[in-house]
């Protein structure tokens, strides 16, 4: 059985894009924001986060720029592109449909 912190396959991209739709962030900030908003349920390792960011950048859904971080260190800030916003809308609709269907099945009562 999976642990509660395991993400359903394919949801990490959606979660990252949602965080970046709010504001540009560096990778560590994306990870921390997901953890904070989810009440420590969603914890993304660097080994999952950075390959996902790279893939999203390759797809053209996010872009990256180097800038000083809050503590004056050089960091790569990611932001959603126009194409990424369209993809986020599509993926959000797909997720809503899928999660509603799963909820219906999980909540079935023996009749």
Image: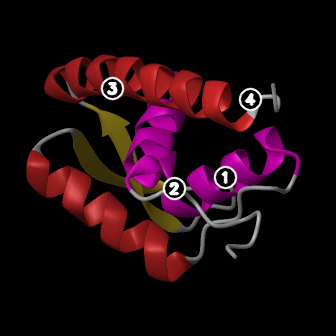
Q: Which residue is mark 1?
A: 70
Left or right of 73, for residue 38: right
> Percent x, y for residue 69?
57, 56
Q: Are marks 2 and 4 in contact (CB under 8 Å)?
A: no
> Percent x, y for residue 75?
46, 63
Q: Which of pointers 2 and 3 lies earlier in the amino acid sequence?
A: 2
The reply to whether residue 97 is in sight is: yes
Mark 2 neighbour density, 10 Å: few (under 14) some (14–19) many (20 or more): few
Q: Which of pointers 2 and 1 lies earlier in the amino acid sequence?
A: 2
Q: Which of pointers 4 and 1 lies earlier in the amino acid sequence?
A: 1
Q: Secondary structure at mark 1?
A: loop
The reply to whether residue 24 is in sight is: no
Q: Which residue is mark 2?
A: 8
Mark 4 or 3: the one toward you: 4
Q: Which residue is mark 3?
A: 88
Mark 1 neighbour density, 10 Å: few (under 14) some (14–19) many (20 or more): few
> Percent x, y for residue 59?
11, 48
In the image, which disc is placed on residue 108?
4
Mark 4 or 1: the one toward you: 4
Q: CA distance from mark 2 to mark 3?
A: 17 Å
Q: CA distance from mark 2 to mark 4?
A: 21 Å
Q: Secondary structure at mark 2?
A: loop
Left or right of 14, for residue 28: right
Residue 102 sits in quarter: top right
| Residue 6, above or below 107 | below
| Residue 54, above or below 11 | below
Magenta-highlighted residues: 10-39
């Amino acid at each position: 059985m999976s642990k509660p912190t395991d993400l359903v396959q394919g949801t990490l991209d959606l979660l990252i894009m949602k965080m970046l739709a709010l504001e540009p962030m560096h990778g560590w900030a994306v990870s921390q924001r997901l953890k904070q908003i989810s009440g420590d349920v969603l914890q993304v390792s660097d080994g999952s986060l950075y390959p996902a960011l790279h893939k999203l950048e390759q797809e053209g859904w996010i872009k990256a720029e180097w800038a000083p971080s809050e503590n004056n260190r050089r960091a790569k800030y990611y932001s959603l592109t126009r194409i990424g916003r369209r993809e986020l809308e599509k993926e959000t609709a797909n997720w809503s449909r899928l999660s509603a269907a799963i909820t219906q099945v999980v909540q079935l009562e023996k009749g």
